[in-house]
Image (cartoon, grey):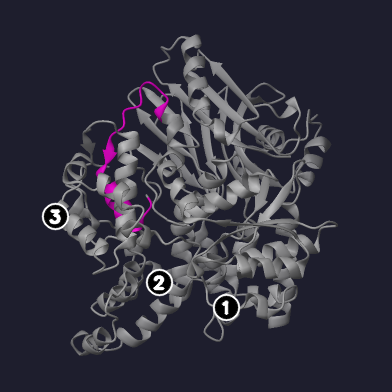
């Protein structure tokens, strides 16, 4: 059925490249993605059209040569390179066969390809369930289509360098093309410092873009690319707000249970060993419980533990695994093991990315890869079912702060309750008291470096979705609005980027059933009391989980999947950080305001303030710059 891989390609718009040169460059682009697909590699070239396609393959279902890519349609017109998983393809296969199409193998690649040949791209996309990014070349009309799945589970970059149009699963593939010139996009850099990731459609390189989720890019020969939306999370969220589900609690619980069972079951199909990540929290426990309920043998589950109790969920995961009867593997990771991962991060995340949970995510992926090739993950539950603690903070602040004139807000009493060494989150609470809108409150809670453009010369102040005042018209509920914003920003650009790169670094395929688009549509249509009740989010999801796991095993304060980076920066990582954060390196990397940056570093290492998120963001950028930009380079605005 599936082939989870890496794809890359280019079009020489001048059609001036020799075919041997095109094949050599395409092979180099594929080689840069070897970790995404170590089982097979292929290239395809059309000299007359100036296009070259490259592919690396991680075989999961249909391990035969029939799944080889690039793949040409039976009529010879279309060529596809594809990264992802499409589930529940039996009905599509039957339709194709009824129409007289003879399928050569069992891969979902072929089903997608022949569906596009038979019904067209738009009609095919409406039928697909799963995670996917693909490039489709029409040899007759000389048209390229680039497609990304509805929620942005699989990545896809594109851009133009002179006469060359480039695209690929990761930026390292684009960099392998000889015409690629790496120029820092100053606005994207400011966005990164603000959010700890570069939000789509921006990219750290000027002139390169991420294709946003649910979109199709079309490039006709001699024309400019056009982008259309085939699935809109905004429309789904608005429809759910306007016409919420009219189900009582028991009906809603039954419906969600059935939806999740179907989503999990379809993602358990593989011709290679399969397992799941298990933290013992609500989301991963739900996925594992539904896997075990539909399996005839113990499901393989994996968790990692830390000696630092504030970061350790291994005991909770073990209790859930024992209750469900899974085949559980647990590994306690020493601080030195986690720290050893840090120098490799900028290789795997070839765009600056500073969510420190990328470290344990990689470690649990590496643990799982020792036994399995596919692992199911619980990512997405917080966005779909309102699980983040910050939603409740923001709502409390909205109700208790905005109703009071700014000059009368209780700044002094709040400051009086601050501990001697307050963390960044507490200071954010104090800063929020000066804000004047719901959007501003949430924007501040998800911001790392406030007014980040001051550290990047020439960068413009951000005016992305977090500044969109019109959202309140379409989504008047504050909780619903926060969930939607996270689902189209933080989820694809942070959470899904993290799991994709961490798992692909060890050639492991990660599947995310909680963001099956049908589950997302259901979640966005739930009335708020079925999302949030008794001061807790994920109310209905918890009800489903409690069918399989006693509440006492999973009901506890939410923990982040992190590591004590702030402590490490004062101890074993201090030398690494000191070597990166010198005035010379700060200046070389294109940052300004170096005095303030250095001041924050000193305050942190001396224990006067906790600047962990800001410093991690800064240090990851400096490490990325050192890895990918060997000399000072020109900068360009978006």
Q: Is residue 290 visible?
A: yes
Image vertical order of residue 11 relative to residue 394, above or below = above
Q: Where is residue 188 drawn, in percent x and y?
A: 31, 47
Where, quadrant-wise, is the N terminus in this rendering? top right
Q: Are marks 2 and 1 in contact (CB under 8 Å)?
A: no
Name the quarter where the C terminus is drawn.
top left
Whether residue 516 is in magenta: the answer is: no
Measure the alpha-carbon separation of dots 2 and 3: 42 Å
Magenta range: 175-197
Label 3's element? helix
> Number of callouts in the render?
3
Q: Which residue is mark 2?
A: 473
Mark nearer the viewer, 2 or 1: 1
Relative to 205, residue 461 above or below: below
Whichever of labels 1 and 3 marks the residue nearer the N terminus, that label is 1
- Read off the residue under disc 1: 556
The image's mark for residue 595 is: 3
């Amino acid at each position: 059925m599936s082939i989870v891989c890496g794809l890359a390609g280019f079009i020489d718009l001048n059609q001036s490249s020799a075919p041997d040169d095109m094949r050599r460059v395409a092979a180099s682009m594929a080689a840069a993605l070897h970790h995404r697909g170590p089982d097979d590699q292929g290239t395809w070239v059309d000299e007359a059209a100036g296009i070259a396609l490259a592919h690396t393959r991680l075989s999961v279902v249909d391990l035969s040569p029939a799944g080889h890519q690039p793949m040409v349609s039976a009529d010879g017109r279309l060529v596809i390179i594809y990264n992802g998983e499409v589930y529940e393809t039996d009905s599509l296969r039957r339709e194709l066969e009824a129409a007289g199409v003879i399928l050569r193998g069992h891969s979902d690649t072929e089903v997608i390809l022949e569906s596009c040949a038979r019904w067209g791209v738009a009609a095919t996309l409406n039928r697909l369930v799963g995670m996917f990014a693909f490039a489709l070349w029409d040899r007759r009309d000389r048209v390229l289509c680039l497609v990304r799945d509805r929620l942005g589970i699989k990545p896809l970059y594109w851009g133009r360098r002179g006469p060359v149009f480039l695209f690929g699963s990761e930026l390292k593939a684009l960099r392998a093309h000889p015409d690629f010139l790496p120029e820092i996009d100053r606005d994207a850099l400011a966005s990164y410092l603000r959010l700890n990731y570069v939000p789509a459609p921006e990219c750290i390189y000027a002139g390169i873009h991420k294709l946003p989720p649910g979109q199709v890019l079309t490039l006709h020969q001699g024309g400019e690319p056009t982008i259309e939306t085939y699935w809109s999370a905004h429309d789904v969220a608005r429809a759910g707000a306007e016409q919420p589900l009219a189900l009582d609690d028991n009906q809603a619980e039954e419906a969600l249970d059935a939806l999740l069972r179907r989503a999990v079951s379809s993602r358990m199909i593989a011709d290679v060993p399969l397992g799941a990540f298990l933290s013992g929290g609500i989301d991963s426990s739900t996925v594992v419980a539904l896997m075990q309920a539909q399996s005839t043998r113990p499901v393989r589950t994996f968790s990692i533990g830390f000696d630092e109790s504030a970061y350790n969920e291994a005991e909770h995961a073990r209790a859930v695994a024992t209750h469900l009867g899974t085949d559980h593997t647990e590994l306690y990771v020493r601080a030195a093991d986690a720290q050893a991962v840090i120098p490799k991060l900028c290789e795997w995340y070839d765009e600056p990315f500073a969510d420190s949970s990328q470290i344990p995510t990689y470690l649990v992926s590496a643990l799982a890869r020792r036994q399995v090739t596919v692992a199911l993950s619980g990512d997405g539950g917080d966005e779909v079912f309102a699980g983040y603690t910050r939603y409740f903070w923001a709502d409390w602040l909205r109700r208790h702060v905005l109703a009071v004139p700014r000059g009368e807000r209780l700044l002094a009493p709040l400051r009086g309750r601050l501990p001697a060494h307050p963390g960044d989150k507490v200071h954010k609470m104090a800063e929020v008291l000066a804000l004047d809108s719901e959007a501003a409150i949430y924007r501040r809670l998800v911001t790392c470096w406030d007014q980040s453009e001051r550290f990047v010369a020439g960068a413009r102040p951000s005016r992305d979705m977090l500044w969109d005042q019109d959202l309140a018209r379409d989504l008047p509920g504050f909780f619903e609005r926060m969930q939607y914003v996270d689902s189209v920003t933080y989820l694809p650009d942070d959470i899904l980027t993290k799991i994709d790169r961490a798992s692909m670094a060890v050639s492991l395929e990660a599947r995310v059933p909680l963001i099956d688009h049908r589950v997302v549509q259901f979640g966005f249509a739930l009335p708020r009391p079925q999302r949030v009740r008794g001061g807790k989010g994920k109310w209905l999801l918890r009800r489903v989980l409690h069918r399989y796991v006693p509440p006492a095993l999973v009901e506890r304060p939410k923990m982040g999947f992190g590591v004590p980076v702030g402590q490490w920066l004062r101890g074993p990582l201090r030398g690494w950080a000191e070597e990166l954060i010198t005035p010379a390196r700060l200046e070389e990397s294109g940052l300004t305001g170096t005095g303030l940056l250095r001041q924050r570093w000193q305050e942190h290492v001396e224990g006067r303030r906790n600047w962990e998120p800001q410093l991690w963001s800064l240090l990851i950028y400096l490490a990325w710059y050192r890895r990918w930009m060997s000399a000072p380079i020109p900068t360009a605005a978006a």
